[in-house]
Amino acid sequence: MSEKEVKKICSSVSLTLVKWKLASKEGKIILDYICGKLYSKEKDEENNKSVDDHFDEALHVKCQTLANILDKMSEVVAEIELGEDKAVGLEQLCDLSVSMNKSILSNKSFNSSSSNNHNSSIIELDKSVLLSSDLTKWTKTILKCYKNQLKMNQIVSQNICHLKFREEALFHTSIWSVQPGLDTECLVAECAVEQTLQYCQE
């Protein structure tokens, strides 16, 4: 039962992160268009202002598309949060099961040794074992990092049409592309989830 739940959680998180990557690529294309339209090298500050003074239907459509992409990213974060909730629930369920087994066994030496090592319950997978607390830790890390990057992307979206210089626009675009919110800790957690998924029974 626990292995099936682990597989469901890892599979859901993995699929959700693919959705983010696709949305991020879509957003990069839109941002490149906006930068080319408003902040090309040939345009000086006065030309940029003149573009701002006139309604540009194509630009408006691109901005709306970018807003829709952000909505997709918000949905991704919500799905990650759901996965994190399930991981916490699974950890609590496993710990409760271990606790009940201890009570049934009521072996003094067993209790004393287990109380010193009660960090987490062990879940047996098809090709490995997993500490239930590890899955919770990984999903919490992924959630935190993607929330941070979503906030950055929202700021980029809000500012991208209201900047004065091309360099500023390129900097904002790089924040979207490089995704500094998804740090090394996040990448390690993502790899751990993917590896755990492979360890589960097919």
Image (cartoon, helix red, strand yellow):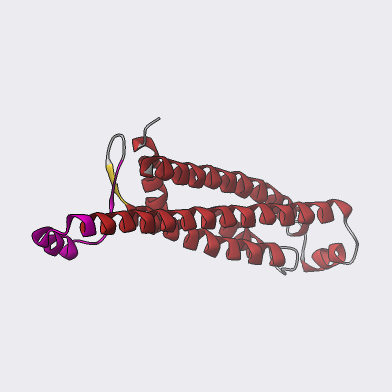
The answer to which image quadrant residue 48 occupies is: bottom right
Q: Is residue 114 magenta?
A: yes
Left or right: residue 113 compared with residue 202? left
**Residue stretch in magenta:** 103-124
Residue 184 spot, x, y in % from top left: 39, 56
Q: Is residue 20 magenta?
A: no
Looking at the image, the residue that sits furthest to the right is: 54
The answer to which image quadrant residue 157 occupies is: bottom right
Residue 155 spot, x, y in % from top left: 65, 67
Q: Nearer the viewer, residue 42 or 26?
A: 26
Looking at the image, the residue that sits furthest to the left is: 109
Quarter of the picture holding the C terminus? top left
> Residue at horizontal 82%, vertical 54%?
59
Residue 168 spot, x, y in % from top left: 64, 66
Q: Is residue 54 above or below residue 135?
A: below
Residue 129 spot, x, y in % from top left: 27, 43
> Residue at horizontal 42%, vertical 49%?
190
Q: Nearer the viewer, residue 64 or 171?
A: 64
Q: Nearer the viewer, residue 107 or 29?
A: 107
Residue 58 in view: yes
Left or right: residue 126 compared with residue 5? left
Quarter of the picture holding the N terminus? top left
